[in-house]
Image (tube, grey):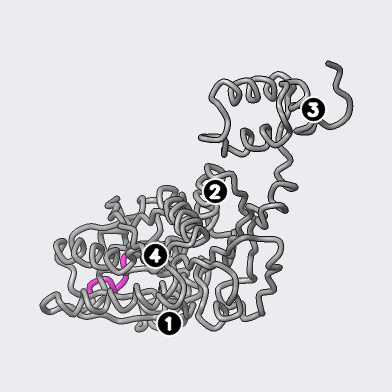
Amino acid sequence: MAMTGRLTSKDVAAAAGVSQSTVSLVMGGKWTGRVSPATAHTVLETAERLGYRPNRAARSLRMGSTRTLLLVVPTLANPFFAHVHAGAARAAAGHEFGVIVHQRTGYDDRESLTVPHEAIDGVLATSMEADLVAELRGIPLVMLDSEPGPAPTVNVDVEEGMRLLTGHLAVLGHRRFAHLASEVDSWTFRARGEALAGAVAAVRGATLVRRPTAISVQAARAAARALLAPAHPPGAPGGSWKRLAGRRTASADAPGRVTALVCDDDVIAAGAYKAARDLGLAVPGDLSITGFDDVLLAEALEPELTTVRLPAEELGARGVETLLELLAGGEPPAVRLPVDLVVRASTGPA
């Protein structure tokens, strides 16, 4: 039978000797109990021989579904969110859904989210605050790495990550902690800071100081320098920053000097490395440094960075599974994914 133009279910029906509705049932996976196995086999075999593929767009319109999910992220420059997208896309593809990404202009983007209801079936919103979530009412929504609220959440146990880091450093003898904290006002960073403060408070004789920074290497470098060597500003006795670099400074042995620097992010930790080098502090001999996320950068640093590994791909995948359960009319429970402490060479005895 010669076929011209785009194949349709009518063409398959004619070639298989069945009705067009039978082809629709079989190709839609709804033939069980309505079409005999032998007929279903004939339809599938005929469709494969002819190279027929169902028109998903037309099918979606008939079903009132686009089979498309929207993933909202603050940035794709951070590898963490790229991995979240990879996990979401993989899980969605397994259910014949697609995922499109909307990148906000950063964590602090307060612009309204204009989401075309007719173009998507649901939203996965990552690291988003409650006032923005309110604008998505009426759209099936799952929150990732966000404060628990009216929508189902899939979160990573960042609090446990901070407790694991604190316990690791405490066993090494550290009692003078500093927190190089992200200045981003979002749930995940607030949770990290609160968990770290609580964990340090539980260590007898331990102290904690905190300094905020933007999530960039240069900003973190400046913040760490100010935190680690307040007694050695540029031009003070002992030399300039440049002349201090490369040798052990007086501050390395000063009473009360910080011995463990806990960073909210691996990028921030990279800035802390540069600050330590500026001040002539050896890592980990004079100063132990830890990160958070375990992106590729953690192994590129020298020494390699002790950090907390977050299951970014699983976060995206579980978010999709939760959203699909919601779309099916279910009431999915909150999900909290475990984290792992990855000990490398950047931490040592106090």
Q: Marks 4 and 2, Cα distance to the nearest angstrom? A: 18 Å
Q: Could you tell whether 93 is left or right of 10 in the image?
A: left
Q: Nearer the viewer, residue 319 or 145?
A: 319
Mark 4 and mark 3 in contact (Cβ < 8 Å)? no
Residue 135: say if magenta. no
Give the position of the C terminus as an image quadrant: bottom left
Q: Nearer the viewer, residue 318 or 324?
A: 324
Residue 11 disc label: 3
Distance of label 1 from label 4 (alpha carbons): 41 Å
Q: Residue furthest right?
A: 4
- Disc nearer the start of the sequence (1/2): 2
Q: Which residue is mark 4?
A: 155
Gap between marks 2 and 3 measured at Cα: 30 Å
Three-letter amino acid code of the residue under disc 4: Asn
Give the alpha-carbon distance from disc 3 to disc 4, as whole Å. Answer: 48 Å
Q: Relative to the observer, which residue lies in front, 260 or 82?
A: 82
Q: Which residue is mark 1?
A: 233
- Reply above or below: 2 against 96: above
